[in-house]
Amino acid sequence: MSILEVKNLNLGFASEDNFYQALFDVSFSLEKGQTLALVGESGCGKTMSAMSILNLLPKTAKIVSGEILYNGENILTKKASEMSKIRGGKIALIPQDPMTSLNPLYTVGEQLLEVIKIHKNLSGKEAFNQAIEAFDAVQIPDAKSRLNNYPHEFSGGMKQRAVIAMALATGAEIIIADEPTTALDVTIQAQIMKLLNEIKQNNQTSILLITHDLALVSENSQNIAVMYAGRIVEHASTQTFFSNPNHPYSKALLKSIPSSEYSKLETIKGQPPALSQIIEGCRFHPRCDYCMEKCRLDIPLLKEIIPNHYSACFLNGN
């Protein structure tokens, strides 16, 4: 069952005299109790898709069309007051940089208690006890005393755990983890991902994992959506994706990372397009080794090539 569905989302940015489209008919779904990895190169639109879900877009950004369904309701039509209850309470965000995601002027406990009071309507001893429980759940030792610490007294991994505790304390059904292991060393990365997986299993939490790290994806997700230059080009189970990638961009991504399957690392020729660059047809065609004349003229749509495996490529006959 899908707890979150993004349907045909189109978004762009307005300047003084132009409008630059950044997302093109983006569609994907997140199942309850599972992890969907949204992957692609930097600047492809992963984070902007996530911020659209949370309605945390820059002032110049505008959603042109599409729907974002949370438990069947289009949250794009919600009032600001309604959305503020969903954001943080039902759909929580783990930001990219754990080093800057906490306010340095307040103790970590004060920030956690504020979240609990807003979204759980608790105060006093109940809120304090729940804060301790949240710290215990994310394996922060000596939770009661650590609530009195300021962010600078926490390591990077501990800050990330504190941010996860905030999501856990509100009982969020969905966690959007935007590059959750950025700036953390490999050992801490593994610990953070293990913690997120435990939370998912224990609470049936759904996780939208935004990353460019395919190794992280292979071990920590059930499904994957591949994004290129504002479009979803492939959507499949993680197992199917790694065993039988279909889209030329997906294949190129896999060949560019260390793997026992490929003897030689390969690069993807060219560069991703700039936001202001207009590309007719398939947005990947300038970099694609399989480009045909049709690719330069027409836009391939996501097509189900086998059950639950979608790809947007004319090589599939669509």
Image (spheres, rainbow, N blue to C red):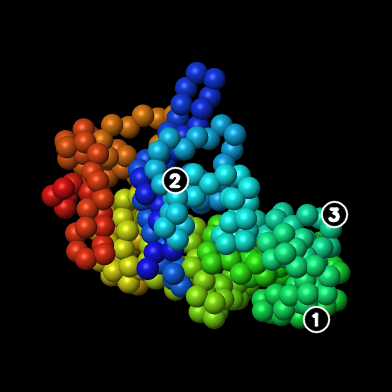
How far apart in space, not on screen, are marks 1 and 2 (Cα)? 41 Å
Q: Position of residue 188 (x, y in %)?
A: 63, 72
* Contact flag, marks 1 and 2 (Cβ < 8 Å): no
Q: Position of residue 250 (x, y in %)?
A: 32, 56
| Disc with the residue nearer the chain's start (1 vs 3) | 3
**Mark closer to the observer (2, 3):** 3
SS at badge 1: loop
How far apart in space, not on screen, are marks 1 and 3 (Cα)? 22 Å
SS at badge 3: loop
SS at badge 2: loop
Q: Quadrant of the N terminus?
A: bottom left
Check disc 2 and report the residue beneath it: 44
Q: Position of residue 28 (x, y in %)?
A: 37, 55
Q: Residue at x 26, y 54 (%)?
A: 311
* Contact flag, marks 1 and 3 (Cβ < 8 Å): no
Check disc 3 and report the residue beneath it: 105
How far apart in space, not on screen, are marks 2 and 3 (Cα)? 34 Å
| Disc with the residue nearer the chain's start (1 vs 2) | 2
Q: Residues within 10 Å of mark 1 (few under 14, many from 20)?
A: few
Q: Residue at x 67, y 70 (%)?
A: 169
Type of amino acid at the residue the image marks with label 2: Cys
Q: Residue at x 16, y 48 (%)?
A: 318
Q: Position of residue 193 (x, y in %)?
A: 55, 72
Front residue of 76 and 294: 76
Type of amino acid at the residue the image marks with label 1: Asp
Q: Residues within 10 Å of mark 2 (few under 14, many from 20)?
A: many
Check disc 1 and report the residue beneath it: 142
Front residue of 42 and 167: 167
| Disc with the residue nearer the chain's start (2 vs 3) | 2
Type of amino acid at the residue the image marks with label 3: Leu
